[in-house]
């Protein structure tokens, strides 16, 4: 009887080790997925910042074109100014030129603000790009380490499964059936010490 009990204790010990390995193996893909999600989140933020930078650059080009249009309109008004004969028309033309200069100054102020915003955004994008590259390297190394760990766990698991088969072959069929039944009902524990 004592030999049967010792065989069951060894089998339980082997099953406990297999159970721990299975639990560790389940954690590996979750770790990889978590790291990948974090990296993808950073990449999404980087792409959003890059899109914003392009939008700001486009807005700046549009504003610069508007400033050039104000210059050409001002030149036309000044040419027209030299051909004016009455004071009333001359005053109206001067007011038009002043309005154009005021509008151009407002647009140029906007261009300066855009340039400052573009500079900030470029620095942020560059920092994010470097951070993503750094995290990508860390991710690749960690993923490789976790995959190696998973391979090691799989190898250990195969060895333990083989050992379990050897241990189970020595135990009587009825006793093994009862052991497996209890193990399935009691969350993997069929034999426990009584103190």
Image: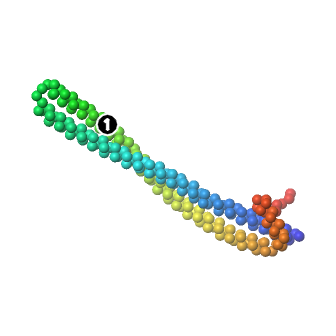
User: In terms of secondary structure, where does tag 1 sit?
Assistant: helix
- Is residue 188 rendered to the left or right of residue 89? right
- Whether residue 123 is visible, yes or no, is no
Above/below status of 120 relative to 31:
above
Q: Quadrant of the N terminus?
A: bottom right
Could you say which is closer to the camera, residue 51 or residue 27?
A: 51
Number of marks present in the image shown: 1
Q: Position of residue 57 (x, y in %)?
A: 34, 46
Residue depicted at 32% across the width and 40% down the height: 111
Q: Quadrant of the C terminus?
A: bottom right
Mark 1 is surrounded, within 10 Å at the Cα level, by few (under 14), some (14 to 19) or many (20 or more) other residues, namely: few
Type of colouring:
rainbow
- Give the image quarter of residue 30: bottom right
Q: Position of residue 18 (x, y in %)?
A: 71, 65
Q: Is residue 193 visible?
A: yes
According to the image, label 1 marks what residue?
A: 109
Question: x%, y% of residue 97?
Answer: 21, 32
Q: Is residue 140 left or right of residue 123?
A: right
Q: Quadrant of residue 119?
A: top left
Which residue: 49% across, 57% down? 136
Q: Residue at x 61, y 60 (%)?
A: 28
Q: Position of 144 compared to 124: left or right?
A: right
The residue drawn where x is 26% and y is 40% is 67
């Amino acid at each position: 009887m004592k030999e049967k009990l010792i065989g069951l204790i060894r089998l339980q010990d082997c099953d406990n080790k297999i159970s721990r390995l299975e639990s560790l193996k389940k954690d590996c893909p979750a770790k990889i997925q978590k790291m990948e999600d974090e990296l993808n989140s950073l990449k999404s933020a980087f792409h959003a910042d890059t899109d914003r930078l392009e939008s700001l650059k486009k807005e700046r080009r549009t504003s610069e074109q508007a400033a050039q249009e104000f210059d050409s309109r001002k030149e036309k008004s000044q040419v027209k100014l030299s051909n004016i004969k009455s004071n009333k028309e001359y005053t109206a033309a001067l007011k038009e030129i002043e309005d154009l200069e005021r509008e151009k100054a407002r647009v140029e102020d906007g261009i300066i603000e855009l340039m400052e915003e573009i500079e900030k955004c470029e620095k942020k994008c560059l920092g994010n790009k470097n951070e993503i590259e750094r995290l990508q390297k860390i991710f690749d190394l960690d993923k490789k380490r976790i995959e190696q760990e998973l391979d090691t766990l799989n190898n250990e698991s195969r060895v333990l499964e083989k050992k379990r088969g050897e241990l189970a072959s020595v135990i009587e069929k009825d006793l093994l059936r009862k052991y497996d039944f209890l193990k399935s009902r009691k969350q993997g524990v069929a034999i426990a010490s009584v103190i």
